[in-house]
Amino acid sequence: KTIKGVVKDETGETVPGAAVYNLTTGVAVAADMDGAFSIEAAPGDQLLFTSIGMTDYSVVAGYGDVLNVVMKSILVNPIMMVLWNIKV
């Protein structure tokens, strides 16, 4: 069956281009610019969601047709850099 959903981050922003893998069948798709995806999966199939800068999210497909996913950012605390203009 087809499972549809939207991939978002913890702030509610969509995650365009997130990869969605059905590890059971080997099929992979990418979320569109709005974070929406559609993938074939049977109940019990293992789905893996990945995106650069995000923690991978794994879930077992159930019997529903909709699966909305919230991914968490790898960077908990942003690193700030200060550039100094030093003249000699």
Image (cartoon, rainbow, N blue to C red):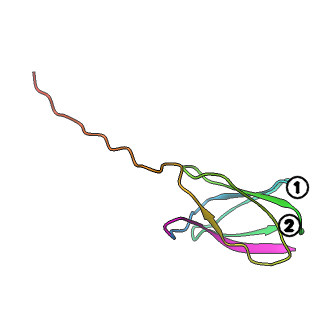
Which quarter of the picture shows residue 18?
bottom right
Q: Which residue is mark 1?
A: 24
Indicate the position of residue 46 as horizontal and vertical percent values. 83, 58
In the image, is 66 to the left or to the right of 31?
right
> Of the numbered discs in the image, which one, if any, rests on residue 50?
none
Indicate the position of residue 62 as horizontal and vertical percent values. 84, 71
Compare marks 2 and 1 and give the one earlier in the sequence.
Answer: 1
> Of the numbered discs in the image, which one, if any, rests on residue 41?
2
- Dot 1: element: loop
Q: Amino acid at mark 2?
A: Ala
In the image, is 47 to the left or to the right of 80?
right
Look at the magenta stretch and give its main secondary structure: strand
In the image, is 67 to the left or to the right of 81?
right
x 61%, y 51%: residue = 55
x 57%, y 71%: residue = 34
Asked whether residue 55 is drawn in magenta, I would say no
Q: Amino acid at mark 1?
A: Thr
Indicate the position of residue 58 as horizontal and vertical percent values. 73, 57
**Marks 2 and 1, how far apart in space?**
8 Å
Q: Quadrant of the N terminus?
A: bottom right
- Above or below: residue 33 compared with residue 18: below
Label 1 Cα crowd, 10 Å radius (few <14 / some 14-19 / many 20+): few
User: Which segment did they paint magenta?
Assistant: 1-11
Asked if disc 2 and disc 1 are in contact, CB closer than 8 Å, the reply is yes
In the image, is 86 to the left or to the right of 8?
left
